[in-house]
Image (cartoon, rainbow, N blue to C red):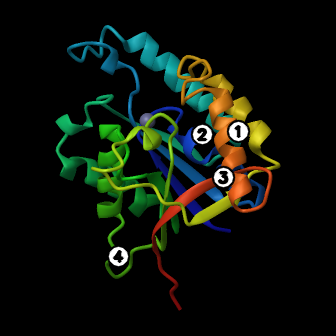
């Protein structure tokens, strides 16, 4: 049994980035926790107005709760931070919030965003997570992998930012259908084909990543750190 923590910026990133992988972990009876850092709604306004968007935030979080229940993960925790405005939060505060959950849950494996994504929240979550997982004596985290998010990882300026270069794959041939079903629950977050965040684009990416390793479907990751202890 392994303890796994998914640290995502927005509701839906947990499924877009590693939905298939979570399903595989649950099949293996691993314990999975999910953190959703930003509330996912208030970036629609020029000035953040939590009160005005309260109902929509509740509605979106209830979708995430349903998705988590469907996945049978151990917990999902919402940090409720400003959507697409994580750069208005001190990085140290972000680190401390993530660190608190890591100390309590003691995960061995972490899945989070790629540091070169276009989305500012994704980049900051990557930064805060890697800081929270620094390998001091007694740190439980031994493996950190980053996932790709269609419409962010593939929209970054590849000349300026870190390119996503996958070197770790999970076959999701048996779980792709379920991943798509869970993603469909986030219908307000998904866009129409040929948008990069459409169901067809997500399926196409899974086929492409699969064909890269000679299977029908896969999710791709990049290893940040993998420690083997005695
Ligand atoms: Zn996101």
Residue that label 4 marks: 135
Relative horizontal placement of residue 16, taking residue 170 as reference (left or right): left
Q: Which residue is at 55% across, 45% downward?
A: 17
Any part of residue 27 in sight: yes
Q: Residues within 10 Å of mark 2 (few under 14, many from 20)?
A: many
Labels 3 and 4: the sequence-earlier one: 4
Distance from label 4 to label 1 (Cα)? 32 Å
- CA gap, disc 2 and disc 4: 27 Å
2 or 3: mark nearer the eye = 3
Q: Identify the residue shown where x is 41% and y is 26%.
A: 40
Residue for badge 1: 179
Badge 2 marks a residue whose secondary structure is helix
Instruction: Find out whether the residues at labels 2 and 3 contact each other: C-beta distance under 8 Å.
Output: no
Q: Quadrant of ligand 1?
A: top left
N-terminal-most mark, 1 or 3: 1
Question: Disc 1 and disc 3: Cα gap in Å?
Answer: 15 Å
Kindly indicate whether the residue at mark 3 contacts the one at mark 1 (C-beta within 8 angstroms): no
- Residue underneath mark 3: 209
Tag in front: 2 or 4: 2
Q: Which mark is residue 15?
A: 2
Q: Residue at x 68, y 48 (%)?
A: 208
Pointer 3 local density, CA inside 10 Å: few below 14, some 14–19, many at least 20: many
- Mark 4 against mark 1, which lies toward the viewer? 1
Q: Point out residue 69 in the picture as x, y percentages from the top left corner.
A: 67, 36
Q: Is residue 124 left or right of residue 5?
A: left
Tell me the element at label 4: loop
Q: How many marks?
A: 4
Mark 4 C-beta closer than 8 Å to ligand 1: no
Mark 1 or mark 2, earlier in chain: 2
Q: Mark 1 near mark 2, Cβ–Cβ under 8 Å?
A: yes
Question: Which of the two residues, 43 or 133, is positioned nearer the viewer here?
Answer: 43
């Amino acid at each position: 049994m392994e303890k796994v923590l998914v640290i995502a910026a927005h509701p839906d990133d947990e499924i877009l980035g590693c939905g298939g992988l979570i399903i595989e972990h649950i099949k293996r009876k691993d314990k999975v926790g999910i953190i959703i850092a930003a509330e996912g709604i208030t970036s629609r306004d020029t000035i953040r107005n939590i009160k005005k968007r309260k109902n929509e935030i509740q509605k979106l979080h209830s979708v995430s709760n349903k998705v988590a229940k469907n996945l049978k993960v151990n917990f999902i925790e919402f940090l409720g931070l400003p959507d697409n405005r994580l750069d208005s939060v001190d990085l140290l505060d972000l680190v401390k919030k993530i660190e608190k959950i890591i100390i309590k849950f003691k995960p061995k494996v972490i899945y989070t965003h790629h540091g070169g994504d276009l989305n500012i929240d994704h980049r900051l979550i990557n930064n805060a997570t890697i800081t929270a997982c620094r390998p001091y004596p007694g740190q439980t985290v031994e493996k950190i992998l980053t996932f790709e998010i269609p419409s962010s990882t593939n929209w970054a300026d590849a000349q300026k930012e870190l390119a996503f270069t996958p070197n770790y794959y999970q076959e999701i041939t048996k779980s792709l259908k379920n991943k798509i079903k869970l993603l469909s629950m986030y219908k307000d977050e998904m866009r129409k084909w040929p948008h990069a965040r459409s169901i067809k684009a997500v399926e196409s990416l899974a086929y492409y990543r699969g064909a890269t390793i000679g299977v029908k479907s896969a999710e791709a990751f990049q290893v940040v750190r993998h420690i083997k202890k005695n």
